[in-house]
């Protein structure tokens, strides 16, 4: 059990987590006694009916485990709309595809903002793996945008043909399963999850060759005992994105670092972080299936994968610089009368989105483009040189 002082789980949560732990134990036995951490993370987040994102518990907002930028303020979506306006106008039949739409708030806010800018896409596509989240998104769209709901379509799989327009992935990459590794003088090891009785335990085993090659390709000299993560699923995902985007831009928003900072000797315990009822912790075995498990994004790896997929890194900057570049400072007065309660709420949300002590510097925004002369708005402060 975890030693962290976290809110006490309910009996239903304990029972649900016990079912997932049993499934993990069975998978560990089938894997020779120790299940690779990436596979454990995949089960904890996405196991059908049991994983964090596939079960029915509320995840986003004040009643959930964490709050994302779209939940904080509609100014986030409004800024994205300003950024994407020239991209959509440059496409003949533009569509927007959002990966992992969460509560559905970003999809709704973005369509409303694009409508106000007279730049509505022909279709808004949502790729959502969770049946429970998909149902909530559909209900929210019907409730908030009855006149636009016919433009929104949920996908079971990616389109066969390439699309023109924009792809949006807000806090998607951090939820991809990762390998955890540590460097020793004797060689590289990878973390795994073993089952002793009915208890899950973290263990280590010699790293498989694909992981050894991936860590070696980083070109880093890591000291003995350094623990970190690497996302081996990132390059295939970006490769599929390259096949999908015929013309337009993909906006990726997530917390992360450039490679030299990601694997800094000062960050010797990695970046793994878990969330349960707005409490952060670093114990991925606490209540599996009931808490989120994330790892920061190596944006240098994203840029390398994009280059291999034929995509151009059209922009890279902090979330604060991106939002300010989209004119977020002027938006509260355009949406509400100054000094009204709504105006104060918008200003408070703006601060949380851009202040360095909040989300402004922890989050990065990257634009990947194909077939466009220019790119989206918001990247006047260019950080590509840091990649």
Image (tube, helix red, strand yellow):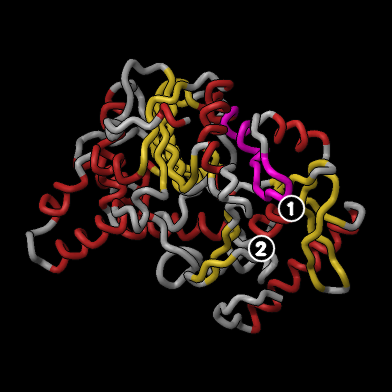
- When the figure is inspected, residue 224 is found, relative to residue 87, above or below; the finding is below
Disc on res. 229: none
Quadrant assignment, res 67: bottom left
Position in image of residue 357 (x %, y %): 34, 58
In the image, is 210 to the left or to the right of 77? right
- The 10 Å Cα crowd at callout 2, few under 14, some 14 to 19, many 20 or more, is many
Q: Name the residue under label 2.
A: 284
Q: Does the magenta stretch include residue 187?
A: no
Q: Circle 2 — which element?
A: loop
State how far apart marks 2 and 1 are (Cα): 10 Å
- When the figure is inspected, residue 73 is found, relative to residue 285, above or below; the finding is above
Residue 9 seen in render: yes
Residue range of the region highlighted in magenta in the rendering: 222-239
Q: Which residue is drawn at 83% across and 39% down?
A: 208
Q: Residue at x 58, y 21 (%)?
A: 308
Pointer 2 with pointer 1, Cβ within 8 A? yes
Q: Circle 1 — which element?
A: helix
Disc on res. 37: 1
| Residue at the limit of the structure toward the left, as seen here | 338
Q: Residue at x 24, y 37 (%)?
A: 325
In the image, is 228 to the left or to the right of 273? right
Lower sequence index among marks 2 and 1: 1
Residue 142 seen in render: no
The quarter of the image holding the N terminus is bottom right
- Please tell me which residue lies in front, 66 or 140: 66
In the image, is 190 to the left or to the right of 366? right
Position in image of residue 210 (x %, y %): 78, 34
In the image, is 226 to the left or to the right of 330? right
- The 10 Å Cα crowd at callout 1, few under 14, some 14 to 19, many 20 or more, is many
Position in image of residue 159 (x %, y %): 54, 31
Quadrant assignment, res 165: top left
């Amino acid at each position: 059990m975890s030693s962290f002082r976290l809110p006490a789980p309910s009996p239903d949560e304990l029972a649900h987590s016990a079912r997932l732990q049993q499934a993990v134990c069975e998978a560990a036995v089938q894997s020779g006694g120790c299940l690779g951490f990436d596979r454990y993370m995949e089960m904890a987040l996405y196991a059908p009916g049991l994983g964090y994102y596939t079960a029915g518990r509320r995840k986003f907002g004040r009643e959930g485990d964490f709050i994302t930028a779209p939940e904080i303020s509609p100014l986030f979506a409004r800024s994205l709309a300003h950024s994407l306006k020239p991209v959509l106008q440059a496409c003949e039949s533009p569509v927007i595809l959002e990966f992992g739409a969460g509560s559905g708030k970003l999809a709704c806010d973005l369509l409303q903002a694009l409508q106000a800018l007279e730049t509505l896409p022909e279709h808004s596509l949502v790729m959502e793996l969770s049946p429970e989240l998909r149902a909530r998104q559909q209900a929210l769209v019907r409730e908030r945008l009855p006149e636009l709901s016919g433009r929104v379509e949920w996908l079971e799989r990616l389109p066969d043909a390439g699309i023109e327009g924009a792809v949006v992935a807000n806090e998607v990459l951090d939820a991809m399963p990762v390998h955890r590794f540590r460097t020793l003088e004797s060689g590289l090891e990878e973390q795994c999850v073993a089952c002793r009785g009915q208890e899950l335990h973290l263990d280590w085993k010699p790293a498989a060759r694909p992981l050894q090659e991936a860590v070696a390709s980083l070109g880093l000299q890591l000291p003995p005992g350094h623990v970190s993560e690497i996302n081996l699923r990132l390059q295939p995902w970006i490769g599929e994105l390259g096949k999908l985007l015929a013309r337009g831009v993909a906006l990726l928003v997530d917390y992360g670092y450039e490679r030299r900072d990601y694997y800094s000797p000062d960050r010797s315990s990695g970046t793994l972080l878990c969330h349960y009822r707005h409490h952060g912790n670093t114990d991925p075995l606490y209540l599996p299936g009931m808490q989120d498990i994330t790892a920061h994004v190596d944006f240098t790896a994203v840029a390398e994968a994009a280059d291999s997929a034929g995509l151009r890194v059209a922009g890279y900057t902090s979330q604060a610089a991106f939002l300010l570049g989209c004119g977020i400072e002027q938006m509260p007065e355009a949406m509400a009368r100054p000094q009204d309660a709504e105006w104060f709420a918008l200003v408070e949300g703006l601060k949380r989105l851009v202040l360095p002590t909040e989300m402004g510097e922890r989050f990065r925004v990257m634009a990947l483009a194909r077939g466009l002369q220019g790119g989206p708005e918001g990247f006047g402060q260019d950080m590509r040189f840091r990649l």
